[in-house]
Amino acid sequence: MRLAYTFHVTQHGETRMILGFHCIMTTYGFWLPNEPRGSYSTFVGSWNLLQFGQATKVNTRRSVAKRDYDHQQKAAMQNALKYPPVRFTGNQAKAVGLSISDLPYDLFALAILPDHVHLIVGQTTRKINVIMGHVKAHATRRLREHGWFADHSPWAKRAWSVYLNNVSDMKRAIAYVQGNPIRAGLKPQRWSVVQMYTA
């Protein structure tokens, strides 16, 4: 394992060391700024999307993915996008996974689904937004080497991350990511870049 210092955060007057991060990167068109279920966006940059309303920003850090919503409205919103929503094929997902293996980060879980990627990153000297940018850039480069997504990025502009402050947080997040493909009806995933987490 590479040695690295990590960040500390102060919450409710208590300083905690961050052991890792749970990162979620979505593909283009998967989660919209005015998503019916809510989003973390404050601005709708597409005129085509703006006809469906302003950004639906939520303040909760809990996932809103399981909220009920109007599926027909969501489909209409996605049809209004400049490009079709991106859904990775199996070969494209493999290319993304191989690209991540080139990066110098300690990874403890990885799940690549058709429309989003989950990643557990360990302690690092870099800001997590920089790391997620590296992941997306390397993956895009690898995908384009195969002739995919030459005309636009396969990724949404923003990504989401959660601090993992203790061993329990790390283990819970790792288990969640490992089980994500199965919950989506896919086979379990095993990536050579993923290390076993020991605490």
Image (cartoon, helix red, strand yellow):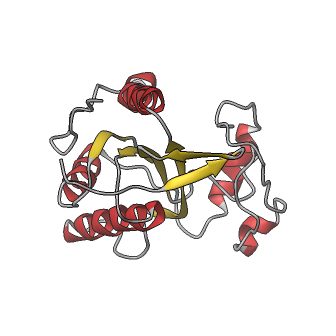
Res. 115 in view: no
Counting labels gives 0
Q: Is residue 44 left or right of residue 180?
A: right
For the residue pair 175 and 73, the one nearer the viewer reads as 175
Q: Identify which residue, 50 or 192, lies in the foreground.
A: 192
Q: Is residue 121 above or below residue 197?
A: below
Question: Residue 124 appears in which quarter of the rendering?
Answer: bottom left
Q: Which residue sits at x=27%, y=54%?
A: 96
Of 30 and 3, nearer the camera is 3
In the image: residue 32, left or right of residue 168: right
**Residue positioned 46% across, 26% down in the render:** 168
Q: Is residue 121 visible?
A: yes
Residue 44 occupies quadrant = bottom right
Judged from this view, the residue extending furthest toward the left is 192
Which image quadrant: the C terminus? top left
Looking at the picture, how far across and down is residue 75, in whole percent?
66, 48
Q: Residue at x 22, y 61 (%)?
A: 103
Q: Is residue 109 left or right of residue 31?
A: left
> x%, y% of residue 63?
64, 37
Residue 185 in the image: x percent, y percent?
A: 41, 23
* Vertical side of 174 occupied by 10: above or below: below
Q: Residue at x 17, y 60 (%)?
A: 102
Residue 187 placement, left or right of 35: left
The one of 138 and 143 positioned closer to us in this rendering: 138
| Location of residue 53 in the rendering, given as x and y in whole percent from the top left corner | 84, 60
